[in-house]
Amino acid sequence: MRFRYIDLLTAIVLLAAAFERLSPAQTQAEAPLQILNPHYVTMNESIVVNAPVDKVWARVGSFCDITEWMNSPEWEDCKYLQGDGGPGTARSIVNEVLVGQTQYSYTYAQPPRKDTPYNLAHGTLAGEAVTPTTTRLTYTMLRDDSILADDAARRRDEEARRARVSEWLKNMKVLAERGKLPPKPAGSLRPPITTPLLNPNPHYASLPMSIVVDAPVDKVWARVGKYCDIGEWGFRSCNLISGKEGEIGAVRTIGHSIIVGQTRYSYTYTQPLRATGPYPMYHGALEARPLGSDRTTLYYTLVWDSSTQPDDASRQKQIETYRLLFEKMLRNMKKLAEGGTLTPEDKQAPVEF
């Protein structure tokens, strides 16, 4: 095995070229976005539940609990098409994929479909302890509403989604407080989606990584958890293209990545669909979780569709190379969060050729 050391930004360019079978020159001139002028909007609703957060999450926080708390005749019972409920799991409800997960939250994505404008639909369900005996459940949706006809259509879309989410949260509250929902109302199943997926046979891979930091969670997150802090611990530069720091929907220069999910000490991001080329539906999630009062575990998890790779050997090499790169980033974050300074060597990444 042979290695040479290059800066992390160059590493990502070369990795993209190798994994998607493009030349490095081609990656310098990326294909245009499928939707040239996206307009990312978010909607969120919350409710307070009279139960501790661990009990609430155990009752309503599994990825396939959705059909119980939707309580709708439009959907058959949820089942897993791939995975076991962790990152990379696909469920039967609109083929949604779990792309980010913390102790008390998950973020899902709807995959793109062939010859269809991709609205980048994502949702996040999160539980947060308000007191030892009460929990706030929050449901957040993000999507690109620029594909809708006009402002009136956008308002109708938001109002309809807000009404559905409010009803779902009320149902979750009933269940988490040990109540029972009424029987499903009469109705018919929603017609199946007949438009094929963009990647017809997706195979979602996940790569969980972690490191322990000798500092409390609030100080760790303040030091390395801002969306463009990657410009220090991972890349040479990062700027926001649109949105604000700490907001779902914010877009940064690196990969045109968008925040699609967020909790107090985590964020999940993805990259948009482009007009041409393979789309691996790449997602990354960074979380800081307290480990006692003065230590923190940083988790970095990647999820992507590895069906764009030609064979198992290529898929395995992709996993190993991602691990080399992102574990180096975690070590950089640890060093910074513990009060250290990065050296030029810290800003280099070992990449296999």
Image (tube, rainbow, N blue to C red):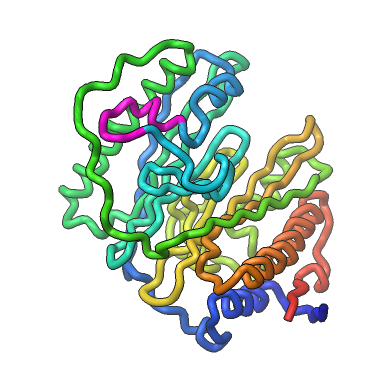
Choose between 263 and 317: the one closer to the eye.
317
Quarter of the image for residue 85 reads: top right
Q: Residue 97: where, in percent of width, then height?
A: 47, 49
Looking at the image, residue 177 sits to the left or right of residue 297; the answer is left
Residue at 55 percent of width and 46 percent of height: 83
Q: Quadrant of the N terminus?
A: bottom right
Residue 111 seen in render: yes
| Magenta extent | 65-76
- Residue for point 66% across, 71% down: 313
Q: Is residue 232 visible in this depiction of the protein?
A: no
Question: Who is closer to the viewer here, 19 or 194?
Answer: 194
Whether residue 144 is situated above or below residue 175 in the rendered picture? below
Q: Is residue 97 left or right of residue 115?
A: right
Dividing the picture into quadrants, the one containing residue 333 is bottom right
Image position, residue 14 (x, y; %):
63, 79
Q: Nearer the viewer, residue 25 or 310?
A: 310
Q: Is residue 288 left or right of residue 87?
A: right
Q: Is residue 154 magenta?
A: no
Measured as percent of width and height from the top left, residue 269 is found at 52, 55
Query: Quick check: is 66 in the magenta stretch?
Result: yes
Location of residue 23 by image quarter: bottom right
Query: With respect to residue 42, does 327 lie above or below?
Result: below
Instruction: Using the image, determine if residue 153 lies above or below residue 281.
Output: above
